[in-house]
Image (cartoon, rainbow, N blue to C red):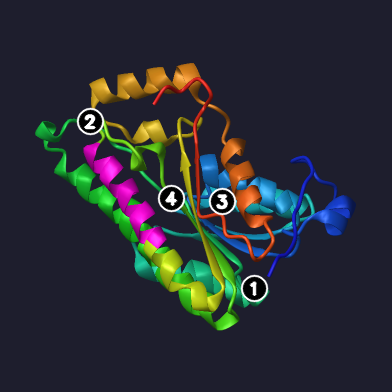
Amino acid sequence: MYRGLGSGSVHVSPLSRAMSSPIEGTVVVITGASSGLGEAAARMLSARGAKVVLGARRSDRIEALAAELTEAGGEARAVTTDVTDRAQVSALVDTAVKAFGRVDVMINNAGLMPQSLLEHLKVDEWDRMIDVNIKGVLYGIAAVLPHMTAQKSGHIINVASVAGHRVGPGSAVYSATKFAVRTLTEGLRQEVKPHRIRTTIISPGAVATELPNSISDPAAAERMNKLYDEVAIPADSFARAVVFAMEQPEDVDINEILYRPTNQAY
């Protein structure tokens, strides 16, 4: 179990990270690691000495990222993972345990954000969001929880959204999935106290990722792209939030982080 407060810049030399970071040596599994928030977290955590296991559907991207992190002196594995397939999520976590002997942190990050008015009846997109945004998180919890309860330690970080705190026209189903993530995580928090497992919800606002690319409705896509063009902040903002939650002393449990670009009004 990692202990103590950490500090320092994103770019940490191997010598300094070995001396200072409580993240050094932790085993972190990340879904949705091929781009955006997951990739940024993988890079920052690897720079601090974490052993990262990357899951995503785009094998070429996570394999290239794992190779890059390894070349830089880190330890990384890539496992092709579709989070809508429970067996694949289990295999991702099993890879971490087989390679490194344990799993300390699970970041359930994979997500989709199709948006449209309910009257447009994009039911296939509703189904896909439920499968990825809710069931994908549940499958991640199911895969990692037996290992963490056996260890009597661990940290599960689930990615929600500002949309999990408010809803607007066009975002009803997406917001519902992110409200669900927050509810699931709070229930998990209450249940895992006997096992000394920590839980964190991270709810980002507009962050520069590929997430808006999943919007097929032209009007919704135009609105969201305009917002992102005007206010979106870099994905390493998410990575810093992850580091903050992980670097707390083991008796401190950061349960939720909600953040937005300074210029984002809602």
Most common SS among magenta residues: helix
Crowding near pointer 1: few (<14 within 10 Å), some, many (20+)? some
* Quarter of the figure with residue 113: top left
Image quadrant containing the C terminus: top left
User: Could you tell me residue 127's position as x and y percent?
Assistant: 21, 50
C-alpha gap between disc 4 and disc 2: 21 Å
Label 2 amino acid? Gly
With respect to residue 119, does 25 lie above or below?
Answer: below
Mark 3 vs mark 4: in front: 4
Crowding near pointer 3: few (<14 within 10 Å), some, many (20+)? many
Q: Earlier in the sequence, mark 3 or mark 2?
A: 3
C-alpha gap between disc 3 and disc 2: 32 Å
Residue beneath disc 4: 110
C-alpha gap between disc 2 and disc 1: 43 Å
Q: Nearer the viewer, residue 90 or 186?
A: 186
Lateral position of residue 64 relative to residue 30, left or right? right
Q: Secondary structure at mark 3?
A: helix
User: Could you tell me residue 38's position as x and y percent?
Assistant: 54, 47
Residue beneath disc 3: 62
Q: Secondary structure at mark 4?
A: loop
Lateral position of residue 64 relative to residue 5, left or right? left
Label 3 amino acid? Ile
Contact check, label 3 and label 4, Cβ < 8 Å: no
C-alpha gap between disc 3 and disc 4: 13 Å
User: Could you tell me residue 246's position as x and y percent?
Assistant: 64, 56
* Region rendered in magenta: 172-186
Residue beneath disc 2: 170
Mark 2 vs mark 1: in front: 2
Label 1 amino acid? Ala
Residue beneath disc 1: 99
Q: Does 19 lie within the magenta span?
A: no
